[in-house]
Amino acid sequence: MKAPNSIELSGTSGNGPYSGGGFASTLFAADEKWNDTQSKGEFSLLTWSYNYRDVGEYQRELTQYQNSTGGSCFLTAPTAVRPHLSGSLGSATSAFTCTTDCLPFSNCAPSVIAISPNAESFANGKTYAFPVFTADERYGALWQAQIKQHMTDPLWQPPHKPCVGSPLQNIAWRQDDGTCLADISESDTGVEMRYYALRPFVESRCELPADAPLPPQGVYIGCLTFNQLNQTSSPSGNICLPPSIVGHEIGSKYPRTVAQPWAIYLRELACVCAEGRFTGEYKANGVSCESVPPP
């Protein structure tokens, strides 16, 4: 070993005396290209389409069949609509897509990702159009889309609840929100609220990158497809549910930002700059107070 980051090789190669150059690799290790913490600007576009009419008509016909007499025209029960989705996306879901895309950082223009019916364009941006769908005054119509910029590090595991101090049943083991919350003890219940660092995040993807090593058993990246979910027995994996709330505060012009990556970053940044209890963990995930310009 000549220096902390270099190795001196001696001896012979397969073709005679070693003459310099080349590299050494570790047997069974992943390719060196996966040891990369630089941003690629990757994100996911998720869409959910719905057909409430076919589900509503199925329910109407089923009710008529169940209440029918011998003279009814409904001699057989109607066929259920997408029954295998009832436990995941819901039977009204007619399509689901997840697409990985990329928008690299630019020094000259802010990055903008938009879902809009107006075909806006930006110097460094990507705009996704609304689809054409038919309004239904009886059953309703809906289409949802979401830009997902971050996901939990697939290899992250929550730390174990501490086994020292109070009995385990008196410890509430909670995840920090990025602000470096302090442990507290509730005097009236005797419960101790103890916090561990917020999970690390990485750029969102819908699938493994090309040629990537397989993740450990039980670890999944991206979403199960619509066809995988719409079958009798679905494979193991992540079910990507549609957003339950809109992207802005009701009755307000301001967007919801609490769960957005920049809001998480700003909370962790405040912790790091104040040298809070989880400074080391958040620095390891790329948060640095040194990058903040002076006021």
Image (cartoon, rainbow, N blue to C red):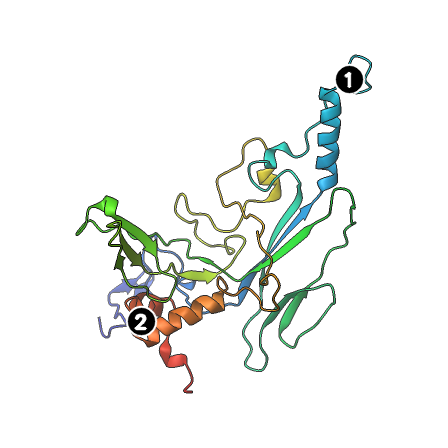
Q: Residue furthest top?
A: 70
- Position of 78 with respect to 201 (left or right) is right
What's the residue type where badge 1 is placed? Leu
Q: Residue furthest left?
A: 165
How many numbered dots are placed on residues in this image? 2
Nearer to us in this view, 50 or 234? 50
Q: Is disc 2 placed on a helix, strand or loop?
A: loop
* Looking at the image, residue 223 lies above or below residue 84: below
Q: Residue at x 36, y 80 (%)?
A: 290
**Figure quadrant of the N terminus:** bottom left
Image disc number at residue 75: 1
Q: Position of residue 270 (x, y in %)?
A: 37, 73
**What is the quadrant of residue 46 in the picture?**
bottom right
Q: Would residue 66 be seen by someone viewing this image from the given angle?
A: yes
Q: Residue at x 68, y 33 (%)?
A: 81
**Figure quadrant of the C terminus:** bottom left
Q: Residues within 10 Å of mark 1 (few under 14, many from 20)?
A: few
Q: Residue at x 75, y 39 (%)?
A: 53
Image disc number at residue 19: 2
**What is the quadrant of residue 8 in the picture?**
bottom left
Distance from Cα at disc 2 to Cα at disc 1: 86 Å
Query: Which is more N-terminal, label 1 or label 2?
Result: 2
Q: Position of residue 143 (x, y in %)?
A: 68, 51
Q: Are marks 2 and 1 in contact (CB under 8 Å)?
A: no
For marks 2 and 1, give the one nearer the viewer. 1
- Position of 17 with respect to 79 (left or right) is left
Q: Position of residue 181 (x, y in %)?
A: 32, 64
